Image (spheres, helix red, strand yellow):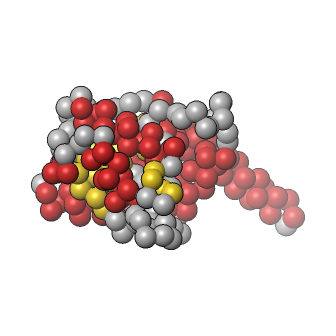
Amino acid sequence: MLSAVLVVLLALAVGFLGWCRWVYVQIERHAAEDQAAPADAIAVFGAAEYAGRPSPVYRARLDHAEALYNRGIAPLIITLGGDGGDEYSEGGVGRAYLMGAGVPESAIIAETHSHNTAESARRIAVIARANGFRRLVVVSDGTHLFRIHEICAANGLDVLTSPRPRVPVESNPPEMDPIIHEILSYTAWRLHLE
């Protein structure tokens, strides 16, 4: 009896490690590949804002979205993210930052209510349907893009991913913490725990 339990536990452990390896490979593949191509809109996933100013990571995402916009990848940028506990929302801060960089207000939609990746993906789907979008380029951190891609696809979106450049405040090489977070978050989403 004890050996049967050990075999089952060993099989579960091997299966879990295999799953983690598969997710890790997908994360790395999406982080390394810039799929940016002509689309209907560019969606920038929010990150921290400090009293109305984007954090260095969020600023890098916004700058990357602006560069894609200026290259003619899409005529519209969607900034995403709700409030972070102060009077500002990440989506609103993103819109203000892009307008300050010269992007016309008419070329920006600020989504200001989502508080996590899954909510942002659902709200993008609603915005896309309301505006007749078919294809989106999504901008975020490289390690975040696989999960975003999968959640957006589950919401019926045709999504291309484009990782933002690294910023000087980050360590080099990348630490495992964001990857472990993404493996666990993706697994929780797949198990409908998120």
Specify the quadrant that holds the N terminus. bottom right
Image vertical order of residue 65 relative to residue 5, above or below: above
Is 102 or 145 nearer to us in this picture?
Answer: 102
Q: State how many labels appear.
A: 0
| Residue depicted at 25% across the width and 36% down the height | 69
Q: Is residue 26 visible?
A: no
Give the quarter of the image for residue 3: bottom right
Could you say where residue 23 lies in the image, as x and y percent from the top left?
A: 55, 44
Is 176 or 92 nearer to us in this picture?
Answer: 92
Is 11 or 124 nearer to us in this picture?
Answer: 124
Could you say where residue 174 lies in the image, as x and y percent from the top left?
A: 63, 35
Could you say where residue 158 lies in the image, as x and y percent from the top left?
A: 26, 46
Return the residue found at the far left.
132
| Residue depicted at 61% across the width and 38% down the height | 169
Q: Is residue 53 visible?
A: yes
| Residue depicted at 30% across the width and 45% down the height | 100
Relative to 6, 66 lies left or right: left
Could you say where residue 32 lies in the image, as x and y percent from the top left?
A: 48, 30
| Residue depicted at 54% across the width and 35% down the height | 167
